[in-house]
Amino acid sequence: MKTRILLISAFLLLTCSIAISKEAVTGNNPSPEGSINVFTSPDLYHLTMKWASEYNRLNPTLKLNVMNVSDNNVADILKTQEGIGFISNEPYAALSPLPAWDMVVGRDVIVPVMNAKNPLLKEINTKGITPQGFARIFESQGTQNWGMLLGNDQKIPVHCYIINDPAIAAGVGNFLNNHQLTMDGIKVSNGQEMISAIQKDPDALGFCKLVDLMAPGNQLLADIKLVPIDKNGNGKIDFMEDIYDNMQDFSRGVWIGKYPKALCGNIYAVSAIKPGNDAEVAFLRWVVSDGQQYLSMNGYSDLVSSERQTQSDKLNSTAIYITAPEKDNYAVIRVVLLVVIAFAVLGFMVSLVIRRNRNKRGSFTDGTTAFPSVFDENSVDAPKGLYYDKTHTWAFMEKDGSVKIGIDDFLQHITGPLTSIGMKPAGVKIKKGEALLTIIQKGKHLLVYSPVSGTITSCNKNLMTNLSALQTAPYSEGWVYSIEPANWSMEIQFLSMADKYRTWIKGEFSRLKDFLATVVNAGTHEYAFVALQDGGALKNNVLADLGPEVWEDFQTKFIDNAK
């Protein structure tokens, strides 16, 4: 009876708040309908115009007003809170304060290049060149030879080419930790002139923008090779640095941190507030998807596929703009109070319903919420009555035929506390094995795959305010979706119940230890602190303090291999 009263009260309160808010809520479109104001720093003007013209061609009823503004005026434009902007790394870094909202839409990378017919090519590809080696050669005022780069007695001369570009000089100076660097070499006026010279000179070396090297099809120009950088200085290009074989590997390596950050510059979309206009959001989603093809055409590097999704997720949960009518100064207050009261009641009701469901289903509960420092088979909770998938998700059919799904306890012990998640909206159809959820920790992310097929009927909105439930209660309050299953009876044959899951999870610990031994340590000292503890036990939250490159490898070599 009490529950019915609460339901009726909540419904009435929400109805009243929606009715009254019609005079105060203007919607999520603060800009004129059918028009977007877009400003750009001068260096990105041609790229922005290309995006605008192509998007206008696809959407002829929408008008994009492109404004070319100087770097010094970007901050003033942002203060108006109107429209979106595209700016490169240099003006972005100079902004103070930084924009309230931004997303990366492309990249401008400085790379060391050499002739593909270099007589020492094999040795260079095996050893790489350390930052100290580059510093020796570019800071030298006398004879320059490849022995100075490789740290040996090679006397083959190096012909260093220098572009008259302050941005490249600044990036190389940061890379070499010498902000006053005056590079000695053969001066050229632009990247095309440098590449033309290097193509003719087997002993040549230079730094230029990656876009200067690109041929159609996302390939390097003929007779040009990237110089591998021995980032950790251990005298070889090891697993963590092996990104130079093709442009796909290189682009991925740049994103996840395997390439020196000092040589990377981002292209940002910025705004004074998070874009809430449907037209702005749609345009920006297009820029980080279909619009990426125009980056390389205009001299820039596009984002890798997984990064595109991560940046697109920043556009989720569009803002609602509330303004008070001139004739009623208390409209906003009434709306806010009513909405707060309504959601307080709803929150209380949800809590009651969850408690009731947990009491009815004794086996559908979590173990302890305290995380031990040691991670072993005894640490993993696996309630009976659930179906478990090899990609570390679970599924449970409710009495009404709907299926709850979420991540398992093993995965949350590995990632540690999360900072955000990316969820699909209700109504989306999914297939078993498709990416269903993105779990994120300080920019590092993993894709989680669906254990079954069906249509999402609801999302656990409680996670938006109580994300810790994914860690503390992954099988109850931390559920992620409720779906209407499409092929339940067939697909559960590929899932495991608790007893079989516990046997299988033992093999997962062995696989995890192998991953850490071969990938994380990988001959470097950078991640030595996550090695196995005394006695062979793993450290709890083992990925929490590791860099994005390890998360990326965990995705591809551990989770994806289990599909």
Image: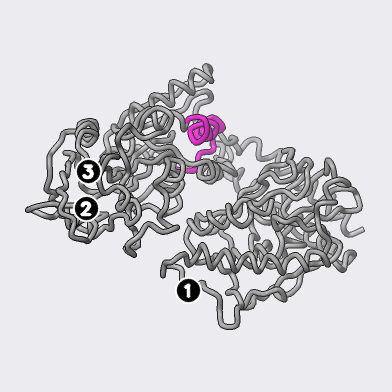
Label 2 sits on what residue type? Gly
Magenta stretch prevailing secondary structure: helix
Name which of mark 3 and mark 2 comes first in the sequence. 2
**Within 10 Å of the Cα at label 1, are there few (<14), some (14-19), or many (20+) other Cα atoms?**
some
**Which quadrant is the N terminus positioned in?**
bottom right
User: Residue 75, can we see it?
Assistant: no
Viewer-side label of 1, 2: 1
Which quarter of the figure has residue 258? bottom left
Provide the residue span drawn in magenta.
273-291
Label 3 sits on what residue type? Gly
Side of 253 where 400 appears, left or right: right
Task: Identify the secondary structure beneath mark 2.
Answer: helix
298 or 85, nearer to the observer:
298
340 or 219, nearer to the observer:
219
Side of 394 where 85 appears, left or right: left
Task: Identify the secondary structure beneath mark 3.
Answer: strand
Q: Is residue 278 above or below residue 531?
A: above
List the residue tagged with mark 1: 529
CB under 8 Å between discs 3 and 1: no
Q: Is residue 241 above or below residue 383?
A: above
List the residue tagged with mark 3: 206
Label 1 sits on what residue type? Phe
Task: Identify the secondary structure beneath mark 1.
Answer: helix
Image point 63% across, 51% down: which residue? 560
C-alpha gap between disc 3 and disc 2: 14 Å
List the residue tagged with mark 2: 173
Residue 52 part of the magenta segment: no
Instruction: Identify the image's colour scheme: rainbow, by chain, secondary structure or one colour.
Output: one colour
Query: Percent from the top left, x then y, of residue 429?
Result: 74, 38
Image point 29% across, 32% down: which residue? 42
Q: Is residue 340 above or below residue 86?
A: below
Residue 284 part of the magenta segment: yes
